[in-house]
Image (spheres, rainbow, N blue to C red):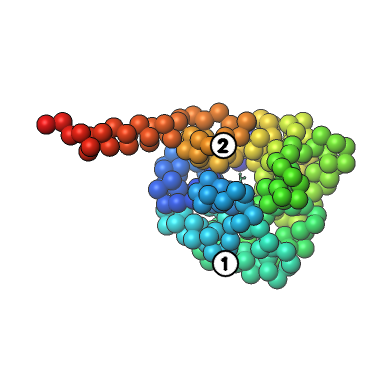
């Protein structure tokens, strides 16, 4: 798609009905992100998500047998060494993922190379890394300082050279995201990183207003599902407690 100049509109999915709906809407790439920990499982951040939880939700999405490419996140601490990374990536593929994604650049390069050598398509994730939120003390924009800017460029090149098929750029300053996108041949999929990435990904709950307790600043929900659900339920409840005779 990048070679054809087509932008990639990707979304997250964590269950069968949403995967089917997004596929029917023509979304070409679905990610079972570890954001599922926050928007589905009620954890405060993604560091609590386990392999078992990822596998469970990947299986549900895979049952939708989508035309969309389906990938899954390697969760926190599941890719600390090469053997563990490959074993866990194989488990996500066995659950139904067609690619895996992990957070980091040159520091995880041995794991990335080993995953790709095992025949598993790999997507990188640079910029703000949610699995590092506790060490970093929050979700911070990346690429403002020269050193950060240079590291992002180096990491993107290293992942691309290692054989990654794409890279998510999360909360990267738009000029740096643009520079990265122009400097590598594989697609960048941005989230909160400006319009010049080769594609965009959002957490579906944010896009449809289904997790109203927190919406990232860069998302403008297209529908307010939370309000619609509450309204439908309130109407139905009234009809139960005070039925019209
Ligand atoms: O976990 C996730 O859903 C992600 C996307 C937001 C890119 O990594």
Residue occupying the point 71% across, 50% down: 134
Q: Is residue 225 left or right of residue 204?
A: left
* Tag 2 residue: 214
| Residue 235 sits in quarter | top left
130 is higher (above) or lower (below) than 121: above
Residue 209 is situated, as x and y percent measured from the top left of the image, at 49, 34
Q: 120 left or right of 178?
A: left
Residue 55 visible within the image: yes
Q: Is residue 110 left or right of residue 131?
A: right
Mark nearer the N terminus (2 vs 1): 1
Q: CA distance from mark 2 to mark 1?
A: 31 Å
User: Disc 2 vs disc 1: which is toward the camera?
Assistant: 2
**Residue drawn at the location 79% of the way across and 49% of the way down:** 155
Report the disc number at residue 91.
Answer: 1
Q: Nearer the viewer, residue 149 or 153?
A: 149
Residue 207: horizontal and vertical position, in percent? Answer: 52, 35
**Quadrant of the image containing the C terminus:** top left
């Amino acid at each position: 798609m990048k070679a054809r100049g087509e932008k990639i509109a990707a979304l997250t999915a964590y269950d069968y009905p949403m995967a089917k709906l997004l596929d029917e809407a023509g979304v070409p790439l679905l990610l079972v992100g570890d954001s599922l920990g926050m928007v589905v499982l009620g954890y405060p951040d993604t560091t609590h998500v386990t392999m078992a939880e990822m596998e469970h939700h990947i299986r549900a999405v895979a049952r939708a047998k989508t035309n969309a490419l389906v990938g899954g996140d390697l969760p926190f601490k599941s890719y600390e060494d090469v053997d563990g990374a490959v074993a866990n990536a194989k488990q996500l593929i066995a659950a139904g993922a067609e690619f895996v994604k992990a957070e980091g650049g040159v520091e995880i390069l041995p794991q990335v190379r080993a995953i790709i050598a095992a025949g598993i398509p790999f997507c990188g994730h640079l910029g703000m890394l949610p699995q590092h939120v506790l060490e970093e003390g929050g979700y911070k924009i990346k690429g403002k300082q020269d050193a950060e800017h240079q590291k992002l460029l180096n990491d993107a090149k290293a992942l691309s050279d290692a054989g990654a098929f794409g890279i998510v750029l999360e909360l990267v300053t738009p000029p740096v995201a643009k520079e990265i996108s122009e400097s590598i041949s594989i697609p960048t999929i941005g989230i909160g990183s400006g319009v010049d990435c080769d594609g965009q990904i959002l957490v579906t709950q944010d896009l449809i207003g289904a997790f109203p307790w927190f919406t990232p600043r860069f998302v403008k929900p297209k529908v307010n599902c939370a309000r619609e659900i509450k309204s439908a339920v309130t109407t139905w409840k009234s009809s139960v407690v005070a039925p019209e005779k």
